[in-house]
Image: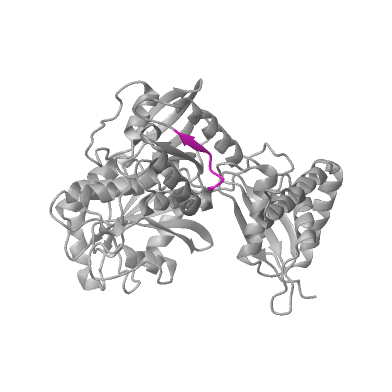
Amino acid sequence: MAANQTPGDDDILDVENEVGALTERLDSLDEELAVARAVSLRASLEDYELDEDDFDLLDTITEDPDQITYLPAMPVLAVVGRPNVGKSALVNRILGRREAVVEDTPGVTRDRVAYKAEWNTRHFTLVDTGGWEPDAKGINASVAAQAEIAIDLCDAVLFVVDANVGATATDEHVVRMLRKAKKPVYLIANKVDDSRQEPLIAELWSLGLGEPYPVSALHGRGIADLLDMVITKLPLVSAVAKQEVGGPRRVAILGRPNVGKSSLLNKAAGEERVVVNELAGTTRDPVDEQVDIGGKIWRFVDTAGIRRRVHLQQGADFYATLRTSAALEKAEVAVVMIDVSQPISEQDVRIIDLVLESGRALVLAFNKWDLLDDDRRRYLEREIEQDLAHVSWAPRVNISATTGRHLEKLAPALERALESWDTRIPTGKFNALLAELTAAHPHPVRGGKQPRVLFGTQSSTRPPTFVLFTTGFLDPGYRRYITRRLREIYGFDGTPINVNMRVREKRKR
């Protein structure tokens, strides 16, 4: 051993040697043999109890690494309305289970929450909306901001009003937006608990949304008839939930307030496109801008800074956060900006976690690098090692948004992250890799049984998502081991990787 090596160095060398040898074996693998073996493993799944989702997944398997397959997205039905009209109670009634939080206090629901729902064998996504501050100041603008997001990301809207209260000024403000949406809107008159209350709904015709549908979310009255009607009007495949394909790649610029997002967009665009002010939170709405970086056109979205603790936010800041989430949903890659002149904060980590949850590609841009001195640099490296270890795979770019320093390095980082985000590993090679990994490090025995991996496939890209058919639950540590080897062999710089399991039992003869 060399004089400057430690036992830790030996461990690292062992891993590097193991990965190097594994990579060589996979590179020299006979492609036809790998495909044949994967087909055989796939056929052996017939001996196990599979459901419809399993067969749908297995039918999408392809050996073409460049082919991008999208499973049809379920139609999206959004439930909107002002506070305390019974939106969450209606969601629970449609789902047939208590999922959404229900309280008498207005504004309990703070975020858009999506649930998988089914009615008469039709599957759809139900979105519960909320978070509308029940204060007199600016409520119209706040309600409009939330409704706009929900409407933009759905195929049809259930607009809920309280039949006992009637149409309010807030309801009328939302209606004006609903009319512009050009999407099916169903006016739901809630809290009609019996026939004696039905005359109350006549007033709701004044909203101009057509016939009101009387229901009682609390007692279930009228819900079945409502769903029978709505389901017939929903499309079989969502027109909005599927990923946009083509055109310039879409980049969301994220970061806490005053971190330099608008300065970056202005410098990239070469003009004062966005208001820049020392006052944090100047930007309220996402702003789209097509810019040329590295000789390539990108569509940038500058987003309002995400503030601490969403549920404590008030008014415009709260809705700016929601709009930021909506912008991220439409993006393909997120640039999370971090101010290196300040310690990495809980907010920074939370924003990064938001990107991971969304499944978008990720690039970290360390801004104000020109202000960094040697002392701060040492602390920063330690903070990155401690707080950002879970995204060590994300490309890092050190920039100055105000001067444009090293801005040209952003384009290659974005391209690398998106290339990884789009990467597909052929099923034959993936199963050969799984065979090597499980042979080198078998899963520990749990409860007298050792879970086996029967078959694996990459179910989708954007982000790369892998599904393992197994005979038992795989420990989280074992799944991390598989993910780590995938990164070491195939790179996947700048993209999260999902490794999911489907535990299946042998079919009873």
Q: In this view of the protein, which residue sits in the foreground, 396 or 316?
A: 396
16 relative position to 284: left or right: right
344 relative position to 24: left or right: left
Q: Position of residue 360 (x, y in %)?
A: 50, 44
Instruction: Please identify the quadrant where the C terminus is shown.
Output: bottom right
Task: Name the residue furthest front.
Answer: 3
Q: In this view of the protein, which residue sits in the foreground, 403 or 112?
A: 403
Figure label count: 0
Q: Position of residue 421 (x, y in %)?
A: 58, 41
Q: Is residue 56 visible?
A: no
307 relative position to 196: left or right: right
Query: Image quadrant of residue 482?
Result: bottom right
Task: Name the residue furthest bottom.
Answer: 448
Q: Position of residue 446 (x, y in %)?
A: 69, 75
Going 67% across and 54% down the picture, which residue do you hit? 6
Q: In this view of the protein, which residue sits in the foreground, 217 or 507?
A: 507
Query: Image quadrant of residue 375?
Result: top left
Q: In this view of the protein, which residue sits in the foreground, 454 or 224?
A: 454
Q: Is residue 340 visible?
A: yes
302 w.r.t. 78: above or below: above
Magenta segment boundaries in residue numbering: 392-398
Q: Is residue 393 magenta?
A: yes
Q: Is residue 465 magenta?
A: no
Q: Position of residue 134 (x, y in %)?
A: 18, 58
Going 34% across and 68% down the picture, which residue do you hit? 101
